Image: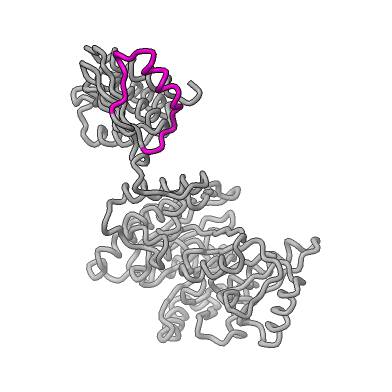
Amino acid sequence: QVAVLVPTTLLAEQHYRTMRDRFADWPLKVEVLSRFKTAKEIKAELDKLAEGKIDVIVGTHRLLQPDVKFKDLGLVIVDEEQRFGVRQKEALKALRANVHLLTLTATPIPRTLNMAMAGLRDLSIIATPPAHRLAVQTFVVPWDDAQLREAFQRELARGGQVYFLHNDVESIGRMQRDLEALVPEARIGIAHGQMPERELERVMLDFHKQRYNVLLCSTIIESGIDIPNANTIIINRADKFGLAQLHQLRGRVGRSHHRAYAYLVIPDARTITSDARKRLEAIASMDELGAGFTLATHDLEIRGAGELLGEDQSGQMAEVGFSLYTELLERAVRSIKQGKLPDVDEPAARGAEIDLHVPALIPDDYLPDVHTRLTLYKRISGARDADRLRELQVEMIDRFGLLPEPAKHLFATAELKLDATALGIRKFDLGAAGGRLQFVEKPNVDPMSVIRLIQGQPKHYQMDGPDKLRIKLELPDAAARFQVARGLISTLRPNG
């Protein structure tokens, strides 16, 4: 069975109608749970759901109530995921341990986006718009009767429909009178969440069937309402909305091949807060198709990533920096994928310490910009394998010219570190007169190869305690040290 969870009653009805039409020729039974149904109808549907007679159920938060029982739930689809809290999403996962979960959103919440970036969730971006789809033109304007009248008349003249968003239910009647005076030829319908269910359903159906050509409404239309003929939205007091909310509201228009317009109406620019100004600038500048993901990454930066295990969906890390936090998270995810328990304190997680007493760095005369140097150091230390290191070398040569000796040493050391870490070497120290190797508690080396090495060349190699191998060799220059280090690592490999 499939459960489709949506945030609003209107969207539930719309999805239900779409799915019912799409699956008309298939032996799938689709039903909807919403407040538009009577208690008796809901009871009958819940019984069928428990018996497995309904295949797809669409519903609002009503689906999360304890009396909703499934016979065999296999997939949960959460549409407009940014409208749900952590508890509500976890309640769905608790229904069954092995339920597949698909979340859909144009503007992911910081926590969800962070989970996707860290590999806890798979992420796919649908960046290609439907054919002939045009971006919505966005204007931030003060209230001006002449300009708004022109916006209404242009849309109505081409046979289209207009959303006028006024998010204050108490004064919505007064706003209707103002609009009737402004555009006398308009047929105005009103929709908001405090209306009786039947009336709200009737108004939305009438608007869908074009009996009204202007819908004066609250944010009840925010989530996923799909009326292709409505191609102008006027948002009154746009400074009071959040970034994701403005993007969602703007997404109500431009759902066909016609050019759509969004007017964000604000009071005098001097009276709005600086944060509101930033939000309006961001939404006006990102008016290309598929900008939601970019807006969501801005949101992640501004608001912080929230908690993985707690209920906060935004907020900054307090005790550690963001990069260390993501590194710890990545390490834990990798361990779990390999079937191991993550041990954050294990030294192997930090990698082997390699010191060959040679300059290993990116010289500032080769690359003067400090920020770029730091970025490259981070990318080199974060490389997971030799192929990635080679790609980085090619990129650096392409961007900045042939590598100087210290930069070559840096890459050679990074590669040695990867190999040494894989073998369970904690520390590798080599200087002009030799050095020593220190192993972790349970290294991944062949003990016989160590014994053969010491027996074959007792003057050069000997054990120094249970976990150290002492090396006595004359190694005057960098080339000799790297050669010995590579030779040792290949000798100690279990299949070497």
Total label count?
A: 0
Quadrant into which the N terminus falls: bottom right
Nearest the eye: 342 or 141: 342
Residue sitting at x 58%, y 70%: 11
Q: Residue at x 29, y 19 (%)?
A: 403
Percent across and percent down for residue 263 are 41, 64
Q: Nearer the viewer, residue 433 or 174?
A: 433
Q: In the rendering, at what x and y percent does residue 215 appear?
A: 52, 75
Give the residue at x 54% y 67%. 156
The boundaries of the magenta stretch are: 441-464
Say above or below: 243 vs 198: above
Horizontal relation, residue 493 to residue 42: left or right:
left
Front one among 23 and 259? 23
* Residue 282 shows in the view: yes
Asked if residue 358 lies left or right of residue 452, the reply is left
- Asked whether 111 falls inside the magenta stretch, the response is no
- Left or right: 168 as drawn, with respect to 59: left
Q: How is the image coloured?
A: one colour
Q: Position of residue 409 (x, y in %)?
A: 28, 21
- Residue 236: x, y in percent? 39, 72
Residue visible at 77% across and 72% down in the picture: 53
Snapshot quadrant of residue 404: top left
